[in-house]
Image: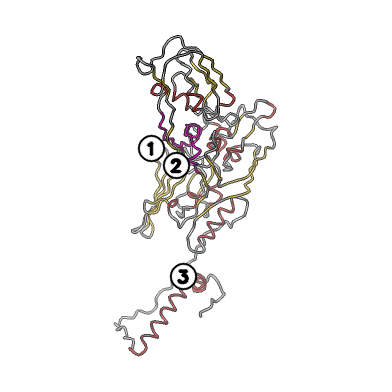
Amino acid sequence: MASNGIEKSMDVLENQDIVLRWKSPNLGKELLYLTNTCTGCGICPTICPTKAIELGPVHEIATALESRGAPRTAPYVLFDLEKCVFCGLCAVVCPVNAIDFKFNETSIKKLPEYPKFEFKIGVDEEKCIPCRYCELVCPTDAIGVDLKLQKKENLVKYPGRARGEIPEGISGTIEIDEKKCCYCMLCKEFCDAIEIDEATPEPLRPFPGKNLRINEKKCDYCGLCEKICPTEVFKITCDSKVKRTIKEPKIEGIAKIDEEKCIACGWCVRCPVEAIKLEKFLEGKITLQNLDKCDPSGCKACIKVCPSNCWYLPKDPKEKIAVNDEFCLFCGSCEQACPYDCIKLERTKVSYTGGKLTQPWINSWQAAFQSLIGQVIPEKQFRTIPLKIEKIKRIIKEKREIPIVPEAIQSEYLKRLIKIRKLLEKVKTRYWIEGRTKKKPAMS
């Protein structure tokens, strides 16, 4: 579709992502919608100034999913290419980074002219062990741990024996307090005698493992697991007198957070040594209502659609459904997915930063952010000014020379031109000239 030298197009990629393009001779814009990242929260349709985004049947799509995060048969939102003005507002308010918007191949999330959600997350390097807890529980793979850990077989050596070879007859006692374990997998990676079953982190049990145990046939009761454990799970006693050398274990590395992937859910804040701090960009509360209509066994839409995995089925079937808002984004996906209005979301705070756009653009963007906490914004953010083109009744055919400004008045002439230019740079002046306001601006 082309108009006035501007070409607009929409394509569906092989992975079902959707891309909208806007091209002019000097500028290119691109909006990329990641269908399988979107959770149908409804924020982008709400704030879109031209109503170019429409929310689909989130409940039907969510309930059809086999599990949380599974590929879906249809996108949660639809884009109207004709209505879209390629402003990029939907990209900066998407809480799960499902929309990206680029100006000439540069994402507006990296441009200081545009405001964006502000959240603060950081790792205290002095406290960080590091282990792999944060990496294993993160639902968006936003955390990677650069871990350097010597294996136990390189630290415990027996005279005359090969590396890792353990003498027979060594005895001792092993005490494990599994209630203290965070299943960071540090001990398992360190020693082959330690075994842990993998598990999916759940809202009431935010751990990536279960069933911690020690294979006593492989254990030589060196006690190093006790030294590296961040939560004091082990107590090891060696009852045998045995000749061996034991070096102190060294753990090096740091957890690295990719803020472009991070959705500020808070799972990592459960760090066993409290090395990660987070300030979320949205705060609020969730209220449950109409639970007599809730059918968690046949629906589970809120569980499947939640980007941060904070919904769960309580042990007591009378409670039907529950949420751990410690991990909640307050995005609204669950509210949109529920067919019986059992979930009510109320946002109380939104944090955003940046924004060097000129007026009145910045007002519209700031109003969109404020609308997330209940402040109403005008439906029409863009106003089209009709242009009246009159026919030229008279054509001047003769050529006219441009008059030369006399040298005596050139200085005053330039001063007046500069004054006119400054006046035209003011928004109020342009509004008055265009007829958008009747109030004449001050010309001084």
The residue beneath circle 1 is 14
**Can residue 17 be found in the magenta stretch?**
no
Say which residue appears at 59% left-offset and 54% top-offset.
370
Percent across and percent down for residue 346 are 64, 45
Magenta residues, start to end? 122-149
In terms of secondary structure, where does tag 3 sit? loop
From the image, state whether disc 2 or disc 1 is nearer to you. Answer: 2
Q: Is residue 197 above or below residue 435?
A: above
As measured in the structure, the alpha-carbon distance from the residue carrying label 3 to the one carrying label 2 is 52 Å
Mark sitting earlier along the chain (3/2): 2
Percent across and percent down for residue 307 are 53, 37
From the image, state whether disc 3 or disc 2 is nearer to you. Answer: 2
The total of numbered circles placed on residues is 3
Q: Which mark is residue 258?
A: 2
Q: Is residue 259 left or right of residue 331?
A: left
Q: Is residue 365 left or right of residue 155?
A: right
Mark sitting earlier along the chain (2/1): 1
**Can residue 148 be found in the magenta stretch?**
yes
The residue beneath circle 3 is 388
Outermost top residue: 169
> Label 3 amino acid?
Lys
Q: Is residue 408 above or below residue 230?
A: below
In terms of secondary structure, where does tag 2 sit? loop
Outermost bottom residue: 408
Say which residue appears at 45% left-offset and 58% top-offset.
113
Percent across and percent down for residue 304 are 55, 33
